Image (tube, helix red, strand yellow):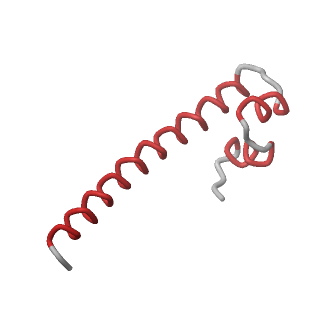
């Protein structure tokens, strides 16, 4: 592979790793916020609606289950 192409590929992979890490952090914060809303007394339906997540997913999160 030519050196210029190798550098572009390496940069693209570094960028992908950074974006993935940010996404994972955002997902963890989203999950924690959803669970906090439930603990505060919000209804499952309302949390699902506002959080754009299914009630089944919320149930799995609440019980510590993964996909």
Residue at the location (76% across, 44% down)? 59
Q: Where is residue 32 in the image (x, y as percent from the top left)?
A: 58, 33
Q: In this view, does 20 lie above or below 41?
A: below
60 is higher (above) or lower (below) than 45? below
**For the view shown, which residue lies furthest in the bottom direction?**
1
Q: Nearer the viewer, residue 35 or 49?
A: 49
Q: Can you tell which quarter of the image residue 44 is in?
A: top right
Out of 14 and 35, give the one closest to the viewer. 14
Q: Is residue 15 above or below residue 53?
A: below
Q: Residue lying farthest left? A: 3
User: In what quadrant of the picture does the N terminus appear?
Assistant: bottom left
At x 23% / y 69%, what residue is drawn? 5
Residue 35 in the figure: left or right of residue 4: right
Q: Please state if 6 lies on the left or on the right of 46 as rendered.
A: left
Number of numbered discs present? 0
Q: Quadrant of residue 48?
A: top right
In front of the other: 26 or 5: 5
Residue 16: horizontal and vertical position, in percent? 38, 55
- Asked which quadrant contains residue 43, the reply is top right
Image quarter in which the C terminus is found: bottom right
Residue 14 coordinates in the image, percent (x, y): 29, 55
């Amino acid at each position: 592979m030519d050196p210029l192409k190798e550098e572009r590929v390496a940069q693209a992979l570094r960028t992908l790793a950074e974006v993935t890490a940010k996404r994972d952090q955002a997902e963890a914060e989203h999950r924690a916020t959803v669970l906090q809303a439930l603990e505060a007394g919000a209804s499952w339906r309302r949390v699902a609606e506002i959080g754009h997540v299914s009630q089944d997913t919320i149930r799995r999160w609440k019980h510590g289950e993964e996909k």
